[in-house]
Amino acid sequence: MSPWPAQLWRSRRIPLAWLLLSRQPARLAIALAGISFAGILMFMQLGFRDGLFDASVTIHRLFNADLVLMSPRSMSSISMAGFPERRLIQSLADPEVEDVTPVHWNFVLWRNPETRTTRSILALGFEPSDPLFIDSILANQAAELNQQGRVLFDERSRAEFGPVGQWFRQGRLVESEVAGQRLRVAGLVQLGPSFGADGNMITSRETFRSLLPTSPHGSIELGLIRLSPGADPLQVAARLKKQLPQDVSIFTKQQFIEFEKNYWRSSTAIGFIFTLGAAMGFVVGCVIVYQILYSDVSDHLPEYATLMAMGYKLTDLLGVVAREGLLLALIGYLPAYGAGEALYALIRNSTKLPVGMELQRALVVFSMILVMCMGSALLAMRKLADADPAEIF
């Protein structure tokens, strides 16, 4: 054999970590199944948690606004309090405020036109001539709301509200009883349900007031403010806070979104429960991987002792166990990712919640699986201290 091939042969690296793992296929399959299960559990828990936060601000993101006025007594989208509409009018005195839109926001009872059962639905009331959403489709449909008793129905609402979207697209006349009054569906929008609202409908302020006649006159739940091009929302908000009374709170649009998310994150147990579920998946995975690696090291202790007797250092053997943990993390993550994608699609189709595979969540779960496997490998390495050639031979 020539010197160059001989040198290459001597310098080759034997994939000892993979050989040790694949020596017992049943054990390897159990380890990968445990890692994948832990990964799926983490994907589902974190996906539900993030989906909850994203769904809670679906409508918030669509508002055509730079600043938002709201009552300090409002806690979240499911507990909105009113404030004087004149505060919104007063904001027009600022030179950088270009336009405003008063918005009514409340829940009313919708009667399913097919089954006649009632269910709470979120109703938004605004002036049809005002730009409510960024989406231009609503602007084209808003003229339908000028006639009292007309509504735009969110066709992505849950099925419990009835086949409204299907009937409307078939050209049928769709009417329903809302808060004891007969209303007609004049068009469809696509907003989507949230944890706070299973369905949505949009109507004019005049129709909204007829649904809730006991609401205080001159009171609104939201005030949308649009600024002149180039204006700084933070600076305008700071000026308005000094000019307006304390009976109104002022947010930038992003602060308004974060306000809603913080309610679900800190004021309810839902966010904590889903985070705890992800942590439990992490712990379960750690236990499974540690047991597999510990058993593998114990079963091959004579082989490790032989390698040490041949001159291999303990650090070399520790590297073998570490590579086993890395291989388990890489291989076990792939089926967890695939199953997560499939389950997210199932959840979107079943619940209409905006749950999808995001890059940040995918990296977080992979990092957790990697830490889980490497940490377990680190604990299993302690068994190598028993690999004493003098005792075994």
Image (tube, grey):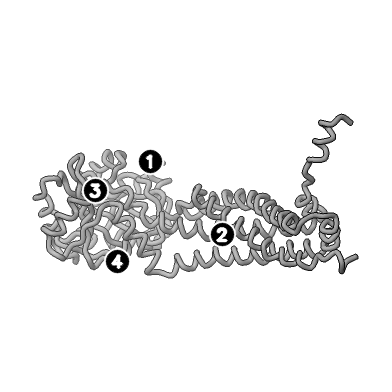
- Which residue is nearer to you in this view: 303 or 348? 303
Query: Distance between the Cα atoms at labels 1 and 2?
Result: 45 Å
Query: Nearer the viewer's eye, disc 4 or disc 3?
Result: 3
The residue to which callout 1 is attached is 171
- Closest to the camera, between mark 3 and mark 1, is 3
Which disc number belongs to residue 95? none
Circle 2 packing at 10 Å, graded few (<14), some (14-19), many (20+), is many
- Compute the Cα span from label 4 to label 1: 40 Å
Mark closer to the chain start, 2 or 3: 2
- Dot 4 corresponds to which residue? 75
Give the alpha-carbon distance from disc 3 to disc 1, as whole Å: 38 Å
Q: Are marks 2 and 3 in contact (CB under 8 Å)?
A: no
- Could you tell me if the residues under marks 4 and 1 are in contact, i.e. CB atoms within 8 Å? no
Tell me residue 33's x, y (percent). Answer: 70, 57
Give the answer, above or below, for where 260 lies relative to 346. below
Crowdedness near tag 4: few (<14), some (14–19) or many (≥20) residues, C-alpha within 10 Å: some
Mark 4 or mark 3: which comes first in sequence? 3
The disc labelled 2 sits on which kind of residue?
Met
Label 1: state its secondary structure: loop
Q: Looking at the image, is mark 4 or mark 1 nearer the viewer? A: 4
Secondary structure at badge 4 equals loop
Query: Of 217 and 170, which appears nearest the observer?
Result: 217
Residue sitting at 63 percent across and 52 percent down? 333
**Can residue 210 be seen here?**
no
Point out residue 134 in the picture as x, y percentages from the top left corner.
29, 43
Residue wearing tag 2? 42
In the drawing, does residue 203 fall left or right of residue 155? left
Label whose residue precedes the other's in the sequence (3 or 1):
3
- Front: mark 1 or 2: 2
- Above-or-below relation of 152 to 177: above
Residue 66 is marked as 3
